Amino acid sequence: MEFLSKRVTEMAESETLAMTRIARELKAQGMDVISLSIGEPDFNTPEPIKEFAKQAIDENWSHYSPVPGYPELRKAIVEKLKRDNNLDYTMDQIIVSTGAKQSIANAVMVLINPGDEVIIPTPYWVSYKEIVKLAEGKSVFVRCGIENNFKVTPEQLEKAITPKTKLIMFSSPSNPTGMLYTKEELEGIAKVLERNPHVFVMADEIYEHINFEGKHQSLAQFSSIKDQVITINGVSKGYAMTGWRIGFMAAQASIAKACDKIQGQITSGTSSISQRAAIKAMEIDPATDNSIHEMRKTFMERRDIMFDLLKEIPNIHVNLPQGAFYFFPDVKYYYGKKHDKYDIKDGNDLCFYLLYEAQVALVPGSAFGDPDCIRLSYATSTDKLIEAVARIKKALEKLK
């Protein structure tokens, strides 16, 4: 379609959403597909949050909201950041958006000019590079393999930074790997940033509360580089509120003001009812709240069960995630294998083979910048996870 813009024709479809869509289509045709492709908690939003949203409807919170978010919500976010992360921000440094994805897009759009370099450690969340592409920036990928627990080192960052580098993008806990950075590892990154004050960092912390190692660590805790850090978070993962579409950023005031400006021209303020619900979410103390504790406990139990099962599959290399709800095993041993009509050349072929032969939906690692791996989400019931891994193992045994 020649009439479509270059920016959209060159943009890739989200491969996680694409695989989820195909799985749904096959389910609709009667196929018993177990989907491990989507990153969505299989929990419902906690009752106090839902009740607060219902109250907001009854109180007629149904009009346009301020572009950067209701003052009450931004105040609640400031207090949450202080309580949970020991970060000091003011309300004018907080922008509420329609999901963390929009917060990320806003940050990239206000910082990146054509040709600016953006360092993205691989593997990365699928949309990072496409958002950079939309802003006409240049993605510079730094490989962080399974042998290094998928984490970038200060030395790697130092080597990748040039005078054209404007931004670094990373997540912790990570999608797709489930790894997380320790305070000491983040301090090493902070020291690199101290030496490179022209570089900003987008720290994606959307999986903050799904952390199996203890207290979450934020890069912005290091005061010397705080103004270089754009912290991204939201309510989707930690509070089981994916459909409410609320994300937020905390950044220096000039960046926040610029994001307010661009958001005002594209979407304006996000859903009024969702924002009211998010106020209640921000008031929840994860250290004492039972709903967050139980969700994290359940994910950890599933992780441990799945890890033991995956280790029983020959010739895959899997590490133990410290957060989020993903495994990202190395499966390249199976590339070059065949079964029946299937010729497995890469991770994409392997995922489609497992979809049709095992009826399990996964996402190829190439979507995240690492073609040696595939991503499995364990955000579903334990019974389904056990059955899914059994199907995968049986299907892989057929490849010769």
Image (cartoon, grey):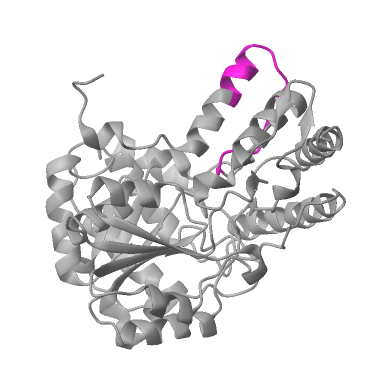
Image quarter in which the C terminus is found? top right
Please name whichever residue, 5 or 288, is drawn nearer the observer in this view of the structure: 5
Outermost residue toward the front in this view: 336
Q: Position of residue 6 (x, y in %)?
A: 22, 34
Name which quarter of the figure residue 181 lies in: bottom right
Q: Magenta residues?
A: 23-40
Q: Position of residue 352 (x, y in %)?
A: 65, 29
Magenta stretch contains residue 28: yes
User: Is 389 placed above or below 223 here?
Assistant: above
| Residue 223 as seen in the image, left or right of residue 368 | left
Q: Position of residue 230 (x, y in %)?
A: 31, 67
Q: Position of residue 290 (x, y in %)?
A: 62, 59
Magenta stretch contains residue 156: no
Q: How many marks?
A: 0
Residue at x 80% of width, y 50% of height = 310
| Residue 269 as seen in the image, left or right of residue 82 | left
Name which quarter of the figure residue 351 lies in: top right
| Residue 216 as seen in the image, left or right of residue 307 | left
> Is any atom of residue 349 visible in this view?
yes
